[in-house]
Amino acid sequence: MQREDTVREPVQGDEDDEHVDVLIVGAGLTGIGAAWRLQASLPHKRYAILEARNAMGGTWDLFRYPGIRSDSDMQTFGYSFRPWREPQAIADGASILDYIRQTASEAGIDQHIRFGQRVISASWSSADARWTLEVRHSGTAGPTTTITCSFLYMCTGYYRYDQGYNPSFEGQDQFAGQIVHPQQWPADLDYRGKRVIVIGSGATAITLVPTMARTAAHVTMLQRSPTYILSLPARDPVATGLRRLIGERAAYPVVRWKNILINAASYQLGQRVPSVSRAVIRGQLKRLLPKDYDVNTHFNPRYKPWDQRLCVVPDGDLFEAISDGRASVVTDHVDAFTKTGVRVASGQEIPADIVVTATGLDLLGLGGVRLVVDGAEVTLSGTTAYRGVMLSGVPNLVFTMGYTNASWTLKADLVSDFVCRLLAHMDRKGHGQVVPTEPPGSAHRPLLDFSAGYVQRSIDRFPRSGAKDPWRPGNNYLRDLVTFRRAPLDDDALHYTPRPSAALHTSRTSS
């Protein structure tokens, strides 16, 4: 599907005296889903969405590199409340963006979005039980404006939008060709008939290689170490059959649950019996690659399956490009760029006209927003995440961090359910503030307990997690489904404070 750009003019909103019940930061897949849940469950709540960019869609509007697609099936990556109607199970970026836009438009969510408004800081006042956000409008260097809210819902994702991780390589200034990072893909880049090197082995690299190989002279995937890669059908035959048999709406939850259970089983198998999981993946590779291909060197990672995210290619397109000779894989370290290509540690020089540095994301917690609570600045790495969604010592704030071992949206959907439950609970009890409080002397571990390089180099920019519940983040959808929808909200970790009388009056008059 071809992408249609929809860029909105920045919306200024009211001036500095505006107050909303809930402020959502981010109008990507997560933020639109959060808004849908909020207005469906708590229609009396006044809310707004602040989006730093001038278009909705987040990742799916930002990234423009060739072949961008989902790395999860759309039955679980899509919203539970809105069936994915396209035939592809692994969808292209333009189709996903259109899906997000349609969801927002049909529910009137787009009318709540303030485009071009970047949140610089958020300051909490316990006396007033409200956040005051400092907002800068895009394209301006003038003074900031403010907006206040009773509850802050951060749907900003986990990486920087303005730049990716782009390490410097020795000699890259002497390279006569073009160097491109996927996050800043030039719209006019012409790679037809060109020799291309893609540095990297993650989801972006394995998407770029087969797509560019269709028209490039040759594409080389240059990886430092291998990644587990699995081929899945671009179209789910079970979903197709069920749609014909029982209709689209009835088929969607059935296929969704089928995929949830298969993915959960795959994760458990990879972690508990890695030898079996490796054998399954290796068997598929042997079938899809040439008979004499060196699978051990190029597709045999040292880590267990799911220690890093399992990469997916639709209909084995990467392996087809390799088998046809249009693409190749080199597993080695970059030694230096030369004038005509890249030299690797073994001494081999790979010729190139274009080098794509698919070297990963630059992670950023809570969109880089500066948090202040009662005059004291909050250091994210000094906080502990309650159930992976709230911060110790930080009132009335929830953030969304999706799964690393399943579809992001599965977790995001549960978090939005939790937010609505929590807000309804606070309204019933007359609470104006809720703050997670961690017991002293608690053990800690990284919130993102994931071995991928892009995670490990940025781990100090994020909250930590605890060693036991409720401070340990869930990574099991089936267990989290019960926790987020049924667990008591009056546990020992959540401390509530009554709503100030002024805030109570404001809430009643605005409802």
Image (tube, rainbow, N blue to C red):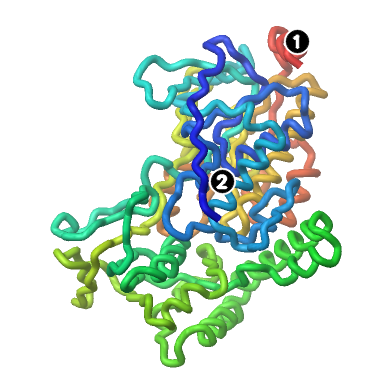
Q: Which residue is mark 1?
A: 509
Rendered view: 140 above or below 324: above
- Determine whether the residue tagged by mark 1 lies in a helix, strand or loop: helix
Marks 2,1: beta carbons within 8 A: no
Residue visible at 63% across and 27% down in the picture: 111
Distance from Cα at disc 2 to Cα at disc 1: 39 Å
Rendered view: 274 above or below 33: below
Regarding residue 183, the answer to whether it shows in the image is yes
The mark closer to the camera, 2 or 1, is 1
Name the outermost residue toward the right: 246
Regarding residue 466, the answer to whether it shows in the image is no
Which is more N-terminal, label 1 or label 2?
Answer: 2
Front residue of 376 and 481: 481
Q: Which residue is mark 2?
A: 465
Local packing at callout 1 (Cα closer than 10 Å; few below 14, some 14-19, many 20+) is few
Hey, which quadrant is residue 144 in on the image? top left
Residue visible at 81% across and 54% down in the picture: 249
Rendered view: 488 above or below 97: above
Residue visible at 65% across and 37% down in the picture: 104
Percent position of residue 416, x then y: 69, 39
Q: Which mark is residue 54?
A: none
Percent position of residue 27, x then y: 57, 36
Residue visible at 48% across and 27% down in the picture: 9
Local packing at callout 2 (Cα closer than 10 Å; few below 14, some 14-19, many 20+) is many
> What amino acid is at disc 1?
Thr
Rendered view: 359 above or below 15: below
Front residue of 443 and 225: 225
> What amino acid is at disc 2?
Ser
In this image, 184 relative to 417: left or right? left
Hey, which quadrant is residue 327 in on the image? bottom left
User: Which quadrant of the figure contains the N terminus?
Assistant: bottom right
